[in-house]
Amino acid sequence: MAVAFWILAVVSVAAGIAVFVVDSMARATFALLASLLAVGVVFLLIDLEYLGVLIILMMVMEMLIMAVFMIMYMMNPAGLMPMKMVHNNRGAVIISGAVFVLLAVGIFRTSWPQRRGEPPGDPTHALGLAIMGPKMLVMMVIGVAILATMISTVVLATHRGRYDRYGEDLKRRRPLDPGPGSGMGMGMGPVLPAADHHAGHGSCGSPDPREDSG
C-alpha cells in the first residue's frame, strides 16, 4: 500500500504540474482530471471509499463536461491548438511560492492532536453523521425541490408539448410541425396557423391538424 500511495502521489503532483505546462485548455483539463483521479484512488487506499468514489465520479463528469463545452464554444478549434495558458508569470510564481512556504510552515509548526479512542467500525456512516447530522431530512427535501425545479424549468421553457403536437388524446398519426407556439419560421416571418397553412395545399407533405387516427 505504501508503494501504491507514493506512486499515486507522484502521479498527482506531476499531473498537477502538467496543468500549467501544457499549451491547450483541453490538455490542461485532462491533466487536472488525472491528478484528481489519483487523489481519489488515494482515498480508496486509506479506506475512505465514499469520499474516494465521490471524488472520482464528480471529477470525471465535471472535467468531461468542461472539455465538451470547450470543444463546442472555443474559437480555438477543439481547445487543442497551442495557446498561452499562464498569464502574469512572475506574479504567479511569487504568489504560489509564498503560499507553498506558508502551508509547509503551517504543517510543521502546528501542534497536531493525538488520536483518542479507536476509529469507528464504519467510517462512511460516521462521516455522514458528522457532515449531515440532524440536517438529513432538510437535504432530502431540498434535493426533491431542486429536481422539481429542473423539471418545471424545462416544461416552462418548452413552447408546446406532446399534447399540442399529437392532439389531446395523443392519437394524431403525425406530429403537427410547425404549429402554434413555434414562433418565427427561421427568420422568414411568422408561422401561419396550421389550418391556413394547409388550406389549398393538400399535397404539401405536412400533416393536416385535423388528421387523426379515427
Image (cartoon, rainbow, N blue to C red):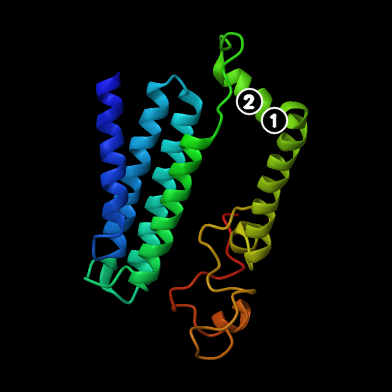
Residue at the left extreme of this rendering: 82
190 above or below 212?
Answer: below
- Return the x and y of residue 146 as percentages of the image width and height: 68, 47
Mark 1: which secondary structure? loop
In the picture, the quarter occupied by the N terminus is top left
- Return the x and y of residue 35 as percentages of the image width and height: 33, 43
Residue drawn where x is 72% and y is 37% of the image: 139
Tell which of 57 and 163 is nearer to you. 57
> Do the numbered discs 1 and 2 sit on residues whose CB atoms are within 8 Å?
yes
Residue drawn where x is 73% and y is 45% of the image: 145
Please give the label number shown on residue 132.
1
Alpha carbon distance from label 1 to label 2: 6 Å
In the picture, the quarter occupied by the C terminus is bottom right
- Return the x and y of residue 16 as percentages of the image width and height: 32, 49
Decide if residue 174 is on the left or right side of residue 18: right
Tell which of 107 and 143 is nearer to you. 107
Mark 2: which secondary structure? helix
Tell which of 166 and 22 is nearer to you. 22
Decide if residue 166 is on the left or right side of residue 58: right
Q: Amino acid at mark 1?
A: Met
Q: Is residue 146 visible?
A: yes
Determine the image quadrant of residue 132: top right
Residue drawn where x is 57% and y is 18% of the image: 114
Q: Which residue is mark 2?
A: 128
